[in-house]
Amino acid sequence: MVFADMTTTTSTSLASTRPRLFRLADFRRLWIGDTVSQAGTAVTVLALPLVAIGPLGASPFEAGLLVMCEYLGFLLLGLPAGAWVDRMRSRRVMIVGDLGRAVLLATLPLAAWLDVLTLAQLYGVGFGLSVLTAFFDIAYQSHLPQLVDEDRLVEANVALEATRTVTAAGGPGAGGALIAAVTAPVALAVDALSFLASALFLSRIRRPDPKPVRHPGARLRDEIAEGLRFVFRDRLLRALTITAALSNLCGTIGTSMLLVLLAGELGLSPFLCGLVFTAEALGGFLGSLLTTRIAARLGEGRAMCVSVAVSGVLWLLALPFFHADWRYAVACVLQGLGWTAFMTFRISSVALRQRRTPAPLLGRVTATFRFVVWGCMPLGALAGGLLGQYAGVRTALWAGALGELLAVVPLLLLVVMRGRRVGLDNCLHRTNT
């Protein structure tokens, strides 16, 4: 199968008669629902650790455990979740996921109001959120191809990833201001309301959401194994999955300690803590707009390699500037530029996975990817917590940043394993599905 170019074209007549992407009502509802949901989640990314570090006085290790719980569901349930989603109506899974997350988050401000909030409850809510998010994200990526044509998947993913990046990274910036104004527990109540709004928009999608056809006698174990085989027998998908896993593993080692450094050691306000995420949002948004141009200019495979390598270097350069003075502004800028670079890999890899995967396998393939890639994150958070507790918070940040430089190796090895000194794109074109 040819490794298709990001800028797949259609005929002029077709392009002129089709409606613009956001004129498709069902896609627009999916986009709004996902955006509102992600915006609320981004507030929680900042609010949960600040509740732990501030009122509950969590140590670096305890803060790392909280981040671990926020991703643990992907490790424990990531694989069966994909097989289950392939058996269910994907839109219904998303709506139930939104409603469940709203209920979980609502318990936190209630417990704070009753003065019974504990770290154990934060861990439990963080884990529950990770389980429901695992189901939601797998279903969302499986549902998207039902709403747009195959040749518009890249365009649709660019639109979704652009707003996801802005909300996921910019939300903490707005959340910092919200937390400073109304306290972190109240900000979590706002997040709960955002999930209810997301469920409302998703319920208004009109496109039929048929229940997938299930083969009689199909066993869950066999369906999971089929998804694993498809990913790891495909050289491209295997390399992309390992690259993303290494990036997430090492990245979480550092990011699990970032707020401990900013809010704990440097004593920055919630608003200033959120600024680094705002910078990432702006950088990620710019990167999403540049993705198709970069891929067209460099070739999709080469562009992804450059994306991972350059982003790793920029994040490494940012670390010496994290101080409570003018240097913090430089760190934020470098963090943002790192996300500008990384978005080419992030968007291109998702579109590639959707193009290469048959529709009946998409949920399981997405789950396999999430299991490996997101499953590394609780391990990285645990390692970051241990390093932060016993070797120092900055040591953990340096270890994570240095490790991220290795993430590009699996893509480069794809060339070496071919035994030829050819360009990456040529190597990718020759791989088989």
Image: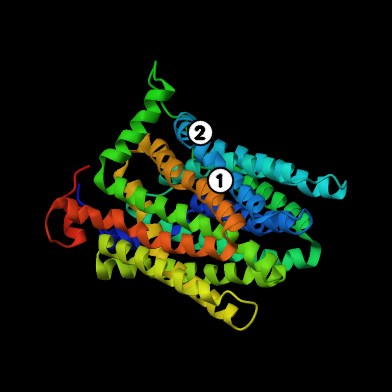
Per the image, label 1 sits on a secondary structure element best described as: helix
Decide: is 121 above or below 422: above
Q: Is residue 81 visible?
A: yes
Q: Which amino acid type corresponds to the residue marked 2 in the rendered image?
A: Arg
Q: Which residue is mark 2?
A: 89
In front of the other: 205 or 156: 156
Q: Earlier in the sequence, mark 1 or mark 2?
A: 1
Residue 7: percent from the left, percent from the top? 29, 62
In front of the other: 280 or 317: 317
| Residue plotted at (26% across, 64% down) | 302
Residue 73: percent from the left, percent from the top? 55, 39
Per the model, the C-alpha gap separating discs 1 and 2 is 24 Å
**Is label 1 or label 2 in front?**
1
Q: Which residue is mark 1?
A: 71
Q: Is residue 245 left or right of residue 59?
A: left
Per the image, label 2 sits on a secondary structure element best described as: loop
Looking at this view, name the residue that lies furthest to the bottom: 326
Quadrant hosting residue 47 = bottom right
In front of the other: 248 or 215: 248
Q: Which amino acid type corresponds to the residue marked 1 in the rendered image?
A: Tyr
Within 10 angstroms of label 1, few (less than 14), some, or many (20 or more) residues?
many
Looking at this view, name the residue that lies furthest to the left: 420
Are discs 1 and 2 less than 8 Å apart at CB? no
| Residue plotted at (31% across, 34% down) | 229
Quadrant hosting residue 268 = bottom right
| Residue plotted at (45% across, 44% down) | 370
Within 10 angstroms of label 2, few (less than 14), some, or many (20 or more) residues?
some
Looking at this view, name the residue that lies furthest to the front: 390
Residue 53: percent from the left, percent from the top? 72, 57
Residue 156: percent from the left, percent from the top? 42, 56
